[in-house]
Amino acid sequence: MKKMAIIGAGSMAEALISGILENGLIDRKNVWVTNNSNQERLNDLENRYGVVGTYDLNALFSGADIVMLAMKPKDAASAIDYICDHLRGDMLIVSVLAGVSTESIEALAGKPLSIARAMPNTSAAVGKSATAIAVNGRVSEEQLETARQLFGTVGLAEFVEEVQLDAVTGLSGSGPAYIYYLIETMEKSAVEIGLEKEMAKQLIVQTLIGAAEMVKNSSKSPEQLRREVTSPGGTTEAGIRVLEENGVQKAFISCIKAAAAQSKRMGDALCSQLQVGKR
C-alpha cells in the first residue's frame, strides 16, 4: 500500500489509524487525514500518530491509492460532493458509513468506483473489532486483499454480501453498546446485593471474557454451555428463570432487529434523497 487519504477524523478513523500503524501496514507519513473544519483535532492526530493532517485536497489525494470515507453518515452527501473531483477509478474507496450503500456512494460521486463498504465496531480502538466487509463488482483481487488487511489490523474481518450489512450493523456494529448495557445492569445489581462497585466490575468483566473464550474455543453451542452450568434447583436456574419470565431473550432479539431496521431506513432515506436530486 502506498498512501491512504482519510475523510473524517473521529473515533473510528483514529482506531483504524492506530491499528494500521501498529501493524506497519502503511508508513505514517503516507497516512493523510482531513475533516470538515476541526484543525485542533487534526493537530492532535498529527502529534499522537505522526500522520499528516491537511485541508489541501490536491495534496491529500496526490498519489493516494486508498480513500477512506469515515465522516458521519449524515454528512456523506456534502462530503463526497466536495471531494468527488479527486476520486479516481483506480482508487480503492473504503467506506465505514453505516447505512450508505456502494451504489449510493457511486451516485454521489457521479462516477464508477471500486468500493469496499465495511461495518467495524468501536472495539477497533482496542484491536478487537468484528468487521464485516462487502465489495462492489469493480474491486480487484488485490484491492480485496487490501481491504482484508486494513480491517484485520483492528480485529476479525469477514466478507459478506452487501445486503447482509444492515443485519451486521444491528448485530455487531451496535453490539458493543448492548454488552455495555449488560455490564451496567450487572454493576447496579452487584451494588444492590452488597458488593463494592469496583470489585464487582472486575468480576463482571472477567466473567464476560471467560464466557466469550469458552464460546470461541468450545465445539459446544452457547445453549449447551448454558445448560451445563444450570443445575436443577441451583442458583443459576433461579436467575435464568427470572430472565425468561421477563422476556429478556425476546427483548434482545427485538433490540437487534430494531437496530438493523434503522440501518436500512438510513440507507433508504439517502437513496430517496438521491432520487429527488436526479429529478
Image (tube, rainbow, N blue to C red):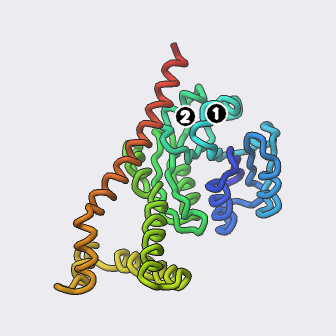
Q: Nearer the viewer, residue 35 or 206?
A: 206
Quarter occupied by residue 22 = bottom right
- Give, as a three-letter code, the residue at label 1: Ile
- Position of 261 with respect to 106 (left or right) is left
Q: Is residue 212 above or below residue 46?
A: below
Where residue 203 appears, as percent x and y from the top left, is 47, 84
Residue at 50%, 38% (x, y): give it: 100
Q: Secondary structure at mark 1?
A: helix
The label shown at residue 10 is none
Q: Quadrant of the N terminus?
A: bottom right
> What residue would you read off at disc 2?
105
Q: Which one is nearer the viewer's eye here, 255 or 109?
A: 255
Picture coordinates of residue 154, whole percent (x, y): 57, 64
* Displayed quadrant of residue 82: top right
Where does the image place residue 13, in percent across and percent down from the top left?
65, 54
Q: Which residue is mark 1?
A: 80
* Residue 91 position (above or below residue 222): above
Neighbourhood count class around disc 2 (C-alpha, 10 Å): few under 14, some 14–19, many 20 upward: many
Please say if the residues under marks 2 and 1 sit with CB atoms less than 8 Å apart. yes
Say what secondary structure mark 2 lies in: helix
Instruction: Estimate the spatial distance between the alpha carbons at disc 2 and disc 1, rounded to whole Å.
Output: 8 Å
Q: Earlier in the sequence, mark 2 or mark 1?
A: 1
